[in-house]
Amino acid sequence: MDELETAVDVWAEAIDHLSTPVEQVAFNRAVWDAKVAKWPVLGRGLADSRDRVAWAKARAPLMGASDVAKFAKIESWPLYMRAKLYDPFRGNGYTQHGNEREPHILAAFGLEQNFTLYRSAGNPLHGATPDALVLGGDGSLILAQVKTVLQKTKTLSSGQTITVPPFTNAKGFFHLPPEYLRQMQWEMYVMGADRSLFIYEEHVDGVPTGMEPQSQWVYRDQQEIDKLIIIADLVLAGMAAATEFKREMETA
């Protein structure tokens, strides 16, 4: 047990003796300040996704992980800017199923769902809402990303139908889609984490297959992060210019 955990335990025992709301508020503030001192990212929270209106308002001007997931090529940044401005993704049946299953899948790994939108330390317009985060005793962070995947089958020449393992490439090896990797790299960058656990569950038309969720570690790739930051900043600069141009046209 580290010093912070020991202190929290001592404070937890002491709270029973706090007689006034003011003392209790002071106690809670002291615990929070100690956590932020050890994990600074906790102090960079912007909004709670359980309040969808407030979360969407806080996230709108940011480059979030799901935005950056699309950033395949630097030269395509104008297309990404247009998508962000005029055609934001609002989800579909698959994303709804994933959202509904997320807390249950995380629970299978002993993880609690995260609802907080965070900004990065280096740029307040870079943000992410990781599915889960684990606070390490040494001040580190470990993230988790949850996906649900439609179970695929393959019919052999013999007529037999077999199940194809998810995320399998042509050579039969496990291979995550590039957009998933970009999303996770961006979350690691924003949060200051070095690794993230990719957790996935198979389903058939929205019904879980009954198989236990599987997982795979993904590690921080600074070279990929640097590329994503360049594209994100180009998109943000383009958005700012487009917004200013629109404002000038409306006031002309």
Image (cartoon, rainbow, N blue to C red):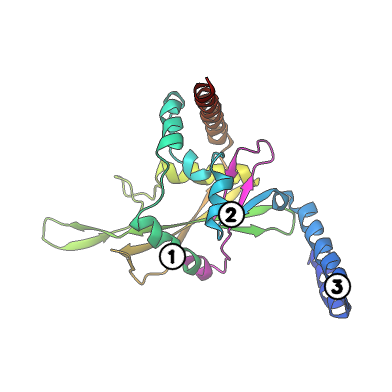
Q: Say whether marks 1 and 2 touch (CB < 8 Å).
A: no
Q: Name the quadrant containing residue 4.
A: bottom right
Q: Is residue 98 left or right of residue 151?
A: right
Q: Disc 2 marks which residue?
A: 143
Give the total of numbered labels: 3
Callout 1 amino acid: Glu
- Residue 247: x and y in percent read 53, 26
Q: Is residue 110 magenta?
A: yes
Q: Counting residues from the N terminus, which is met first, the one under dot 1 or under dot 2?
A: 1
The disc label shown at residue 10, or none: 3
Q: Is residue 127 above or below residue 55?
A: above
Q: Is residue 242 left or right of residue 192?
A: left
Q: CA distance from mark 3 to mark 2?
A: 28 Å
Q: Is residue 23 left or right of residue 162?
A: right
Task: Identify the residue shown where x is 18% and y is 62%.
Answer: 161
Q: Is residue 16 above or below residue 176?
A: below
Q: CA distance from mark 1 to mark 3?
A: 37 Å
Task: Identify the residue shown where x is 49% and y is 39%.
Answer: 68
Residue farthest along the top direction in this orientation: 252
The disc label shown at residue 77, or none: none
- Residue 18: x and y in percent read 88, 76
| 246 or 11, nearer to the observer | 246
Image: magenta residue range: 105-131
